[in-house]
Each structure stands twice: as structure tokens, then as C-alpha cells.
Amino acid sequence: MSTVATTSTPTREPISSSKPATPRTARPWRQLLPLGILVALVLAVSLAEPAFLRTNSLTVVANQAIPILLLGLGQMFVVLVGGIDLSSAALASLTTVLVATWLPGMGGAALVLTLVALTVVGLITGALVAWGQVPSFVISLGALGFWGAVSLVVSGSTTIYVSQGYGSISWLTNMGIAGVSSAIILSVALVAVIWAVMRYTPRGNVFHVVGLNERAALMAGVRARWVKTAAFGLSGLFAGLAGIVLTAQQQSGAPQLGDALLLPAIAAAVVGGCAITGGIGGPWRVLVGALVVTVLRVGGAVAGIDPNYQQIIYGAVVILAVALTIDRTRLSIIK
């Protein structure tokens, strides 16, 4: 009788193609890099012009950064859900026209009415994006042209100077603490409030959740369409706030007063580390990004750089900052 020898083979675990990949190690330095870029820019400008580090000069930079910061904060909510709002700067210009027109007859009530109107405008844009299933780029591009034309019609294509009722907004620039205007203090306080709400409230990260994975958010019970609509509503609200600050700073309203701030506002969000693909970002990042953009805009003139080269340097630094600061550890696909 013959025996058959059998050799046992080691058991192998089945390989699953759906096995999740090991998460990559986060890089905390990326969150601090925008701040490092800001410090480097300030030092570079101060080397060319030492007077730049004086308190008065830095205060001027901070005041110019406020409209960009406010527009950037509104842009942040839209970017977090994976969208873009190209109409925010046009809405800021419309705000300056409405405020300059309504202040003489309505006083402080004009500010409330304007902010409500701009929020409703933003909500309408968001509803068209969320329920109409039209890309935000297309909707907001159309809104940019539409509200820009409305501003021209309401203002009669002229600048409206504010004299009567200016006291309702003059405190934003004329009052403050230790030379720091009320607009700066309130804007920084607003950044802190938004951060606290996002960090410590149960639904504070809902914009991040929708932006990172909308399908998963829907399965978790998040009403993604309402969240997207709210993001555009907040963008409209912050565009209104930026417009009010512009009116106080310029003591006038004009149909194109804030139009040039569109690209700086978007740059402030992405330079600060808000991923244009959605789901990553925060208000403190936007604050740093707004300061980086403003120092770039102002610093070139202060340092005496030829205007023909200022835009080249501005574009190159923005591209470099975005490439270095974007957090790729939490993005599976770069769109």
C-alpha cells in the first residue's frame, strides 16, 4: 500500500481591490507656510523700504486688506462646498451704490436693508446652482454681468458721493483703538467667531463635509443642496459687508468700485490654503491669505518696483504660494 505525501501550502489572505489605502502622514508645516510667506514678504518689502514697518504703514495695509478679507471669507464658504462665486465683487460694487443711494433718506436702516438684499441675491444664486444643477462657474459668471449692469442702471453710471448720513458708516474708518480702525477690529473678531462656530458647534463642519464627499454627506443625512445654497447666501452677505466698508473708506459708491477685488479675494482664499476642490479651509487661513495678497499689491509700489513687473511678481508669488500651501494629504484627486 503506497502512501501519498502531501505538502501543505501556506494560506494567503485574499487581496481585496477595495482595501482602503493607508492615509498619508499629515504635514502640519503646510498650515504654517502661508504665515511664513507673509513674514517673508513683509521683510522683503521692508528691506527695500524700511519705513514700511512703521505702524502707520502697516495700518494702511491692514485697512486695504479688509474688503479683500471679507470677500475672501464669503468665497471660502463657496470654495469649501466645491464651488466658485465670480459675482461677489460685482455684488460688493452694487452694495456701495445701494448704500450711497439709501443712506441720506434711511440712515442706518439702509445698511440692514442692503445686507438682507445681498444675502437674498446670494441665496438665489445658490439655489440655481444646487437645484438647477448648473455649474457654479456658469451661474456666477452670468450673475456677475447681470448685477454689474444693475449697478450701472441704479447709479446712472456715475459715482455717488456720500455726505448726508455718512455718520452711519464713518465710524468704521474714523473710530478705533490705538490707531486700529473699527473695521479691522470687527473683521478679526468676525474671523474668530466663524472659526469658533466651525470648530465647536455640532454642525459647524457641514461645509467641509459636503465639499470633501457630497455623496457620503447625503448618506449621513446632510442636506447638501441646502448647504450649497447657504454657502452662496453667506457669500452674498460678506460681499455686502465688504461693500459697506468700501463705501466708508471711499465715502462714495460706484458701479465698479469693488470689481477689481474679485481675483484678490479668490487668491486670498487659495493662498491661505483653502483647496479649490473643496472641503479644506478655514477663516484664519483666509485672513493670512488676504494679508499676503495685500502686501503683494501694496508692497510692489512701496518698494519702487516698475509697474510693468509688479503683476509678474504678483502672479508668480500667488502661483508658488498655492502650490506650496495646498494640503494634498486630504485630496485623492486634484481637479
Image (tube, rainbow, N blue to C red):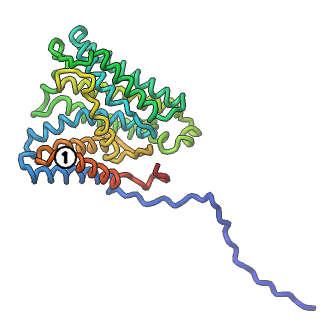
Q: Name which quarter of the figure residue 284 lies in.
A: top left
Q: Name which quarter of the figure residue 101 lies in.
A: top left
Q: Nearer the viewer, residue 186 or 119?
A: 119
- In this rendering, the count of numbered labels is 1
Q: Looking at the picture, how far across and down is residue 322, in whole percent? A: 33, 50
Q: Nearer the viewer, residue 157 or 175?
A: 157
Residue in the image at 26% along x and 12% along y = 102
Q: Label 1's element?
A: helix
Q: Looking at the picture, how far across and down is residue 94, in whole percent? A: 30, 22
Taking the image as drawn, is residue 299 in sight?
Answer: no
Residue in the image at 57% along x and 58% along y = 20
Q: Looking at the picture, how far across and down is residue 200, in whole percent? A: 39, 39
Residue in the image at 51% along x and 61% along y = 22
Answer with left or right where residue 119 lies relative to residue 246: right
Taking the image as drawn, is residue 77 in sight?
Answer: yes
Residue in the image at 25% along x and 32% along y = 67
Residue annotated with mark 1: 308
Answer with left or right where residue 209 lies relative to residue 153: right
Q: Nearer the viewer, residue 37 or 306?
A: 306
Answer with left or right where residue 103 lies relative to residue 113: left
Q: Looking at the picture, how far across and down is residue 93, in whole percent? A: 28, 25
- Circle 1: residue type: Asn
Can you say whether 136 is above or below 98 in the image?
below
Can you say whether 101 is above or below 186 in the image?
above
The crowding category of the residue bearing disc 1, from other C-alpha atoms within 10 Å (few below 14, some 14 to 19, many at least 20), is: few
Q: Residue furthest top?
A: 105
Can you say whether 269 is above or below 118 in the image?
below
Can you say whether 135 is above or below 152 in the image?
below
Q: Quadrant of the N terminus?
A: bottom right
Q: Residue furthest bottom?
A: 1
Q: Residue furthest front?
A: 308
